[in-house]
Structures are given as C-alpha cells and as structure tokens.
Image: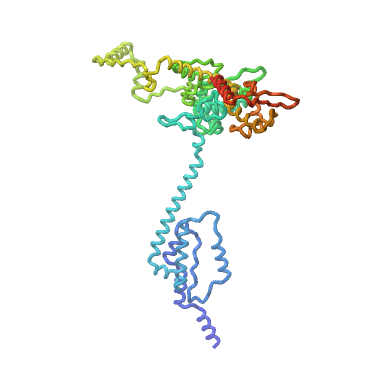
Amino acid sequence: MAQRRVTDFFARRRPGPTARRAKSACRTPSPAVALALTTPGSSRKRARPSAAPGSSRPEPPARRRLRLQDSDSCPSSAPDPTSLACSSLGRKIENTATSTGQPPHLAASKDKNTTSELQSCLQRARVLGARAQALRASAQKAAEEPSTAEVEGSAEQPCGEKAPAYQRFHALAQPGPPGLVLPYKYQVLAEMFRSMDTIVGMLHNRSETVTFAKVKQGVQDMIRRRFEERNVGQIKTVYPESYCFRQERGIPTFRDGVRRSDYQLTIEPLLDLEAGGAPQLTASHLLQRRQVFSRNLVERVKEHHRAFLSSLSPPMAVPEDQLTRWHPRFNVDGVPDIEPAELPQPPTTEKLTTAQEVLAQARSLMSPRMKKALSDMALRSAQPSSPGPPSPVLPATPPATPPSALRGVPQALLERVRAKEAQKQLAQMTRRPEQELRLQRLERLPELARVLRGVFVSERKLALTMGVACARMVGSCRAALSPGEMEQHLLLLAELLPDWLSLHHIRADTYIKLDKAADLTSITARLTHQARAEGL
C-alpha cells in the first residue's frame, strides 16, 4: 500500500506528453520573432514571451526585477535604427499574444502583415543609416577643409564681374577732411606688406629660412585674405629694395607633398649692415619700411593723377609739394592695378615628351647642308602665294564739336569760364588743412553774426562776457559747436569786422561790445564776399 502511494505521487508530479509538447512550443519562438532576434545589428537580448494562460508556475518576482533592470540599462552609444525597428515589432507581437491569450508563435502566424511590416521597417532603417553616414561624412569634410570665405577677398576681380560698391567708392566714404586717400586695392596691398614684413621679421630674427609657404600661411591667418605669389610680385614692384628673392632647395620641410629636393621660393629682407652682429628686423625698421611703402603707393597714384590733369581742357599743372587732395573728378578707386614683378622661377629640366621635341633635339645632330636645305624650304613656304588686299585707310578723326547746349556761346567766354574753373580746382587741390578750417568758419560767420545780434538785443546790454555770449550762441545756432569752437568763430569775426565787433580784456575776463546801429545786411554781405574771395 505504501509503495503504491509513492508511485502515484511521482506519477502526478511528472508532466505528461501533452504538457511537454506545450512547454516546448512555448519555448520555441515563431519564425517572425526569430528573424527579428537574429537580424544583424539588433540587440542580443531576446524578449521573453509572457507565460501562457494555463501555466501554473508564474515568473518569480526576483527574476522579473532582474529582467526589468537589464532592459532599462542602455549603452552609451546611440541605438541602431534596425534594432529599434525589430525590437518594436517583437514587442508588438508579444503584446498581441498577451492580449489574445495565445503563444507568440500562434499570434505571429495569424498576423499576415507581420513579414511585410518587418521588411518595411528594415528598409526604413537602412535608409536612415545611409543618411546618417552621409551627414557624418559631410560634417567631417567641412571640418577638415579650410574656411575659404575668410581667406578670400583679394583685390583682383574676375573678368566681367563688377566690384562691390564699398570698393568702387572707397575714397568717398573716408571719414575726416578729404586728402590724398589711397584706392581700396592699394590699402589692401599695404596691409599685406605690413603682415608679410611682420612674419618675415619673426622668422629672420630667429635665424630661420623664410620660405613663401610659411609666409603665405601666416599672412592669410592675419588678414583673412588670400595671399598669392602675384601679391608678392606687386610688393616687389612698389618696393623693390625690400626683399631678395631666390629659388633654393635642400630646405627641410614638414609638409606632405613637398620634398627636400624640391625648389622653394625663399625671402630675405634687405637691411643695412650693422656693426657688431647680424642685422635684426626691429620694430623701428618695420615702421620705417611701412612708411616707405605707403609713400611709394602715393607716388604711383600721383602719376595717374598727373596724367589725368594733363588730359583736362585746359590742362592743369600742380606742384607735387603743394598737392593736398585729388581733383574732384579724379576717380581714385579707378586707378589700374599694380603690375606684378617677375619672381625667380625654379629651373626647368628638359624632358622630351612629343615627337616635335625629339625632332628639335635631333636637329643639332644634322649636317650644315641639311640645315640649309630645311631653312630654304621654310622660307619658300612662308612667302605668300598672292599679294593680300590693301589695308583700308581709316578716316581722320573729326575735331571735337561743342555740345548742343553751348552752341552760340562765344568761344572767348567759354575759355574764361574754363580757366576760372581750373583756377578754383587748383586752389582747392593745394589748400592746406588750416586753410580749409578757416574757410569752414568763414562760411558760418553770416549766420553767427545774425545770432549774435539777436543775443545782444534780447539781453539788452551794451557788452557781454565771452563765456555768456558763447553759451547763448551755442543754444541758438544750427551747427553743433562747442563753446571753445564758438569762441574761435567770435575771434575771427572780430578780426574781420573790427568796426562792428570789438573785444575788451578787463582783468581775467574778455568782454564783447557790438554796434547795434550797424546795418546787418551789409555786415553779412561783407562776410559772404570775404568767404568767396578766400575760397577761390
């Protein structure tokens, strides 16, 4: 009896064939789930299917917490789009199976669109991966390439392309009183020379061989513009005594693509030999060389300005030491570019690459009779077979006719007007800065005379101190002047009209006395006439 009870106990504990088949079926994943789990690039962790509805052994709490911790932990790198798509699809199948109460492989077999949805997810993941690789490659390429927008900006422009307005009208936009302003491209070249002299001085002072490659990189980093050999040739044209250029080889380089046996353009500054050591390019030398370069640029612009004055009608001649500004109609920014000087080039080795070069080389091996025969044949072939048509005779250029608006005006009157205009422009070009300041004050004096008389009338006094009069006039004048500038105008007014305005120095103050009975119209007329007389 006891043995039968033990046998029945173990029979009840042992699962039957049906239970074993259900258990193996639950452990075997469906084909869709297996494909999602074995996709390349997907996560190695497999989603555990939920327990079957009829299972009597639920998942232990400890194992469930461990599985949740493993699923919550994520790697530091970004997840693969393919693994995300497959994991989401597997999760959808598991949720479907849980909601319907069936095993995962049965739910996947009932869903007919699972395979097509998986293929679309994989295709979309591949497209996203390719797009991400393309963006990463373009970003890496942009980071490696130098910024050409900052380096570009040289003065030369392509053929047929119009220069921007800030270059074409650079001279007109300069602040301060007009003077001998350099064109925009000349100022850019002066900045290039300053940067180049700084880099060359640094390398020369530490006894390092100065090459064009080193100077080019340093200048471009300083001025954020492109610096080429053409600019070095322009610098040599303007200041030929600044550097000595040579082609040398055997210079150690640390750049790819440049061998030690290659020829490189070397730059050596020309300095005065100093006793007691090697010459150094000091700060005083840099400043002196910069001033010489600027003077040479101004002299080049003066040559074009002199040619422009000689082409006027009537021609004008201005002494160089008295020239303080350009002619009003002289286009400063239209001055042509500086022609670059020829720099030393590396020696070329003769290489025969074509048949014509081989024949030219073999000509030296010919006999004198063969050379003479070839020269006679070349002369006979060069003679024209028939005389060409005669060249047409160009008609003479007709004399310049006056415009239709000036027809009927006497020629003598036109000559006088042109001579007077030329005299006025000559006086304007040779005017000194102090003369220009005096002329500006003279132009303001008629208005200031009326304001000063109004101040005396309103104050009802015979005399006012200089400080009070200047303060009252500053508040009433249209021009923005300081009390000090107003005092200079009053001193000039007292100098020109001593019978109308007089100054009296009493102790530490200066008093102004005005003749109120004088005609204000005649006073302003005299000031206007004086301004016109000095303005010519």
Q: Furthest residue to the right?
A: 507
In depth, the one of 272 and 4 nearer the eye is 272
Specify whether 360 is left or right of 441.
left
Outermost left residue: 386
- Front position in the image: 203 or 30: 203
**Screen quadrant of the N terminus:** bottom right
Q: How many marks?
A: 0
The answer to which image quadrant residue 320 occupies is: top right
Residue 362, quarter of picture: top left
Residue 72 at what x, y percent from top left?
A: 55, 62
* Residue 5 vertical placement versus 113 (above, below): below
> At which x and y percent is residue 492?
63, 23
Q: Which one is nearer the viewer's eye here, 75 or 135?
A: 135
x then y, percent, for residue 321: 56, 16
Front one among 212 and 486: 486
Reply above or below: 36 against 523.
below
Locate residue 532, reporting x and y percent: 54, 21
Whether residue 71 is visible here, answered yes or no, is: yes
- The image shows residue 429, relative to residue 9, as above or below, that is above
Q: Residue at x 56, y 60 (%)?
A: 73
Relative vertical location of residue 23 with respect to residue 273 in this rendering, above or below:
below
- At 35% from the left and 19% from the top, the residue drawn is 360
Query: How has the structure been colored for display?
Result: rainbow
**Residue at the bottom extreme of this rendering:** 1
Q: In the shown orientation, is residue 406 left or right of residue 155?
A: left
Q: Residue at x 46, y 49 (%)?
A: 133
Residue 197 seen in this snapshot: no
